[in-house]
Image: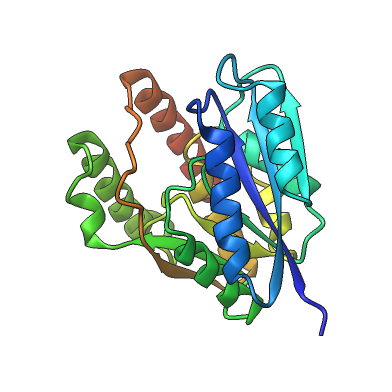
Amino acid sequence: MKKSSVDIVLPCYNPDKDWASNVVESYKNILVDAKSWTPGLIIVNDGSTKGISNKDIEFVRANIERFEWINYKKNRGKGFALRKGVKESKADFIVYTDIDFPYTHLSLINLVNSLVQGEAEVLAGERSDNYYVHTPFVRKIISRVLKKIVRGLLKIDVADTQAGLKGMNKLAKDAFLATTIDRYLFDIEFLWLAGKKYVISPFPVTLKDNIVFSKMNLKILLTEGVNFVKFYIKTLK
């Protein structure tokens, strides 16, 4: 029986110094438990100015058979980077997460297994309440406010839109490529677009214990606030 193909798409911007070895280790852990599908890897370098060398790229290439590296010079944002990677994928299923693989490998394995079994066209990671125990205060507030907005205004079936692990089959790929937001709120736009045509469903995922949260500065918050207003106006048309 032919196995399904799955591409794991990772955006990459100024990664930590051990990113290449961590990616290979995470991939190999996934490979052990991927029974009904074969994983490939697409990494999109979103205009990094540090943290990446040719040695890093060749190390990943030497250890992962199905590997594609996409590179451009100007930083455009996570949403833009992921659209680049998803567009290049020819796999039956696509999963995207972050370069540090912040979720346990079993979270990714179980999510892909459910996709392959046809449980939904789009599965969106949903973090448990334990996520908020060690979350920085600002992130906690933003996350909870977004959940209320998603439920109240956008009527999306997934409340936790910002969890960094999502998957789709190749039919739902068109909804992802139709997104226009380049930075953090692209996830909301994707789920809103996908929900018009496809079955989307939340899927329980677990963060690793050693994950360090990046800081959210005022400039990012203001930019994303403007992006959300523009997006919400578009949903009313």
Q: Position of residue 19 (x, y in %)?
A: 53, 34
Q: Position of residue 168 (x, y in %)?
A: 63, 63
Q: Residue at x 31, y 44 (%)?
A: 210
Q: Residue at x 77, y 75 (%)?
A: 3
Indicate whether 58 appears above or below 105. above
Q: Quadrant of residue 5?
A: bottom right
Q: Quadrant of residue 73?
A: top right
For residue 41, say whether it is visible. Answer: yes
For residue 180, say whether it is visible. Answer: no
Indicate whether 237 appears above or below 226. below
Q: Position of residue 216 (x, y in %)?
A: 33, 27
Q: Furthest residue to the bottom?
A: 1
| Left or right: 1 as drawn, with respect to 131 | right
Quarter of the image with the N terminus is: bottom right
| Left or right: 37 as drawn, with respect to 212 | right
| Left or right: 113 as drawn, with respect to 208 | right
Q: Residue at x 65, y 48 (%)?
A: 9
Q: Quadrant of residue 40?
A: bottom right
Q: Residue at x 64, y 21 (%)?
A: 47
Q: Which is more toward the observer, 235 or 44?
A: 44
| Left or right: 21 as drawn, with respect to 60 | left
Indicate whether 36 appears above or below 16. below
